[in-house]
């Protein structure tokens, strides 16, 4: 039977070992799972811990431009409004902003201008 519980100090060695062996999470530190404002649960059965699940308060954005080819206006709107949006999100307890984009130009712009990190077409900005 699988049960869940909150992460405990005794779990950190197992978490660190699993992160070190996982090719998808190279460089991820166990502190990511205990970061302020997050919740981490351990799921286990009679053989031990199966997985760790970290949850955080994230703001997911969906952007829809009225005219995709109006690059200057679209960029101006983002440059004018995004920092304020991020500030208000942080003031309201959000820890990160996440969105996805199929546009290579949009992803590059958000990484360069706003400090997003790209992971598999998902853009993440920690606040």
Image (cartoon, rainbow, N blue to C red):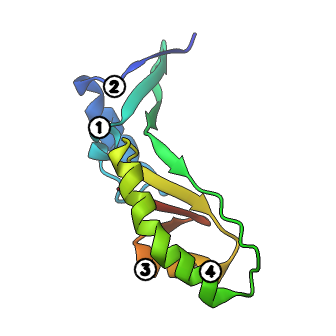
- Counting from the top left corner in percent of width and height, residue 44 is at 47, 19
Sort mark 3 into few (<14), some (14-19) or many (20+) by Cα contacts within 10 Å. Answer: few
Quadrant the N terminus occupies:
top right
Quadrant the C terminus occupies:
bottom left
Can I make out residue 20 in this image? no
Give how far apart the Cα atoms at labels 2 and 3 are.
Answer: 36 Å
Query: For residue 93, which quarter of the picture?
Result: top left
- Residue for badge 3: 113
Picture residue at 43% right of the left edge, 39% below the top: 56
Q: Give the mark nearer the N terminus: 3 vs 1.
A: 1
Q: Give the mark nearer the N terminus: 2 vs 3.
A: 2
Relative placement, left or right, of 127 versus 45 is left
Question: Of residues 33 and 89, which is closer to you in this image?
Answer: 89
Of the two numbered discs 3 and 1 in the rendering, the one whose residue sits closer to the viewer? 3
Can I make out residue 89 in this image? yes
- Residue for badge 1: 34
Badge 4 marks a residue whose secondary structure is helix
Of the two numbered discs 4 and 3 in the rendering, the one whose residue sits closer to the viewer? 4
Picture residue at 40% right of the left edge, 63% below the top: 84
Relative to 48, residue 96 above or below: below
Badge 2 marks a residue whose secondary structure is loop
Give how far apart the Cα atoms at labels 3 and 1 are.
Answer: 28 Å
- Residue for badge 4: 74
Relative to 37, residue 89 above or below: below
- Residue for badge 2: 7
């Amino acid at each position: 039977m699988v049960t869940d519980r909150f992460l405990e100090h005794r779990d950190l060695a197992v978490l660190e070992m699993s992160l070190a062996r996982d090719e998808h999470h190279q460089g991820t530190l166990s502190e990511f799972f205990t970061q302020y404002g997050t919740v981490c649960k351990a799921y286990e059965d009679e053989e031990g811990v199966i997985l760790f699940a970290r949850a955080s308060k994230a703001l997911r954005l969906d952007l829809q431009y009225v005219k995709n080819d109006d690059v200057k206006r679209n960029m101006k709107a983002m440059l004018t409004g995004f920092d304020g949006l991020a500030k208000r999100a942080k003031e309201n307890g959000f820890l990160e902003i996440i969105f996805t984009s199929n546009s290579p130009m949009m992803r590059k712009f958000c990484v360069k201008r706003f400090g997003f990190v790209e992971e598999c077409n998902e853009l993440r900005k920690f606040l």
